[in-house]
C-alpha cells in the first residue's frame, strides 16, 4: 500500500502527521469479499460500492486531482445509481402533507435524494479527521438501526460490522492504515442507502429519526462551508478546523498520553456528547415537535462546543 502514502500526510486536513497508507476502503472491501452473504446483494449495488471506492482512491493517490473534479464524478455516479435503482429514492416522509405535496413528485424526490446522498458522503469524509471518529459514528448508527429498528432487516448493515471492527483494529489500535476518501465514500454509500431503504420500508413513519442518524455528517458539511466562506476561504480547500480536530488539539494540550489514545479519547467524547444523547432521543421520543426541536438543540450544542474549543486552543 505504499503507493497510497503521501509525504507529511494530513497536514492540512486532520491532525495526523504519520506517513501511513490511506487504504481503509480497500481493507473493508477485502473483508466484505470474504463474507459469502455479501454476494446476496444485487450485483449493481456491489458494482457501485466498488466504483465509489475507486473514486475515493483517486483522491488518495499521490497524483493531484482537484476536489471539484472528484465531486463531479461522485455526483454523476450517484445520479446514475438512482436512475438505475429507483427503490433508493426517498419516496416516503413522516409528515403526510409534505408526502402528498412534494415527495410524491418523482423529480423532487430524486433531486432531494441526490443532494442528501452527496452531502452525506462528503460529510463522512469531513468527520474522518481523527482516528476512530468515523468508527464511533458508525457504531452509533449501526447500533441504532439494529436495536431500534430491528423489525426491518437491512442485511448490508449486518455484513459491515466485522469489516468495521477489523478496520478499527488496524487504524486505532495498531495504527497501520487511515480510512482515506476511498473508505469514507464506501461507508457513506452503505450507510446512506441503508437509511433510505429503512425509511421507505417503514413508509416514512420514522423519517425524523432517520434524519437524526444522518444529521452529524450533514451538519459538519454545511457548517464547514459556512465557516470557510465567512473566513473568506475556499469551501473546497481542506483544513484542520473541524470540531473533532480542535477537540484533539485540546486533549493533546493537557494530556501526555500516546497519540493513539488521545485520538480514541477525542472520538469517545464525540460519541458521548453528540451520538449517545441522539440515540436516547431516538429510542424514547416519538413526538414530532420534540424531534424537530432536537435538530436545533443538536446544532446549538455543536456550535457552543465549537466556539469553546476554537477560543481555547491554538488554531494555527
Image (cartoon, rainbow, N blue to C red):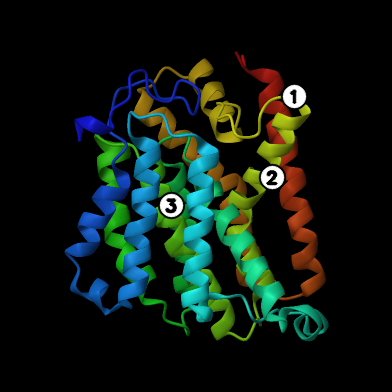
Q: Earlier in the sequence, mark 2 or mark 1?
A: 2
> Helix, strand or loop at disc 3?
helix
Query: What x and y, as percent, mark residue 64?
Result: 41, 29
Query: What x and y, as percent, mark residue 85?
Result: 47, 77
Give the label on residue 222, or none.
Answer: 2
User: Is mark 1 in CB contact (under 8 Å) with mark 3?
Assistant: no
Quarter of the C terminus within the rendering: top right
Q: Earlier in the sequence, mark 2 or mark 3?
A: 3
Give the label on residue 232, or none.
Answer: 1
- Residue 179 in the image: above or below residue 164: above
Query: What x and y, as percent, mark residue 289?
Result: 82, 70
**Mark 2 to mark 1: distance in Å?**
15 Å
**Mark 1 to mark 3: distance in Å?**
28 Å
Label 3 sits on residue: 185
Q: Tell me the residue at 41%/36% (across/down).
A: 264
User: Could one spot residue 277 in this view of the protein?
Assistant: yes
**Mark 2 to mark 3: distance in Å?**
18 Å
Give the label on residue 95, or none.
Answer: none
| 285 or 291: nearer the viewer | 291
- Residue 295 in the image: above or below residue 209: above
**On the rendered structure, is 1 left or right of 125?**
left
| 47 or 238: nearer the viewer | 47
- Residue 308 in the image: above or below residue 142: above
Amino acid at each position: 500500500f505504499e503507493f497510497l502514502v503521501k509525504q507529511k500526510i494530513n497536514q492540512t486536513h486532520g491532525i495526523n502527521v504519520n506517513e501511513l497508507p490511506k487504504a481503509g476502503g480497500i481493507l473493508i472491501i477485502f473483508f466484505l469479499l470474504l463474507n459469502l452473504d455479501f454476494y446476496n446483494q444485487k450485483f449493481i449495488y456491489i458494482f457501485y460500492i466498488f466504483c465509489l471506492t475507486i473514486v475515493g482512491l483517486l483522491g488518495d493517490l499521490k497524483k493531484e486531482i482537484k476536489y471539484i473534479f472528484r465531486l463531479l464524478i461522485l455526483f454523476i455516479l450517484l445520479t446514475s445509481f438512482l436512475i438505475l435503482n429507483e427503490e433508493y429514492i426517498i419516496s416516503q416522509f413522516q409528515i403526510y402533507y409534505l408526502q402528498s405535496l412534494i415527495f410524491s413528485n418523482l423529480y423532487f424526490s430524486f433531486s432531494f435524494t441526490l443532494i442528501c446522498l452527496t452531502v452525506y458522503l462528503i460529510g463522512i469524509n469531513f468527520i474522518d479527521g481523527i482516528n476512530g471518529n468515523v468508527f464511533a459514528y458508525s457504531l452509533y448508527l449501526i447500533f441504532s438501526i439494529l436495536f431500534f429498528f430491528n423489525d426491518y432487516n437491512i442485511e448490508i448493515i449486518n455484513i459491515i460490522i466485522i469489516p468495521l471492527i477489523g478496520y478499527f483494529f488496524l487504524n486505532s489500535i495498531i495504527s497501520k492504515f487511515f480510512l482515506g476518501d476511498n473508505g469514507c465514500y464506501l461507508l457513506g454509500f452503505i450507510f446512506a442507502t441503508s437509511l433510505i431503504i429503512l425509511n421507505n420500508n417503514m413508509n416514512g413513519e420514522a423519517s425524523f429519526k432517520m434524519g437524526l442518524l444522518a444529521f452529524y455528517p450533514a451538519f459538519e458539511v454545511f457548517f464547514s462551508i459556512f465557516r470557510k466562506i465567512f473566513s473568506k476561504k475556499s469551501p473546497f480547500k481542506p483544513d484542520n478546523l473541524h470540531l473533532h480536530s480542535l477537540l484533539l488539539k485540546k486533549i493533546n494540550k493537557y494530556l501526555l498520553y500516546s497519540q493513539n489514545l488521545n485520538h480514541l479519547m477525542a472520538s469517545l467524547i464525540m460519541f458521548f456528547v453528540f451520538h449517545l444523547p441522539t440515540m436516547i432521543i431516538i429510542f424514547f421520543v416519538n413526538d414530532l415537535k420534540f424531534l424537530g426541536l432536537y435538530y436545533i438543540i443538536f446544532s446549538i450544542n455543536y456550535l457552543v462546543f465549537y466556539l469553546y474549543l476554537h477560543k481555547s486552543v491554538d488554531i494555527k
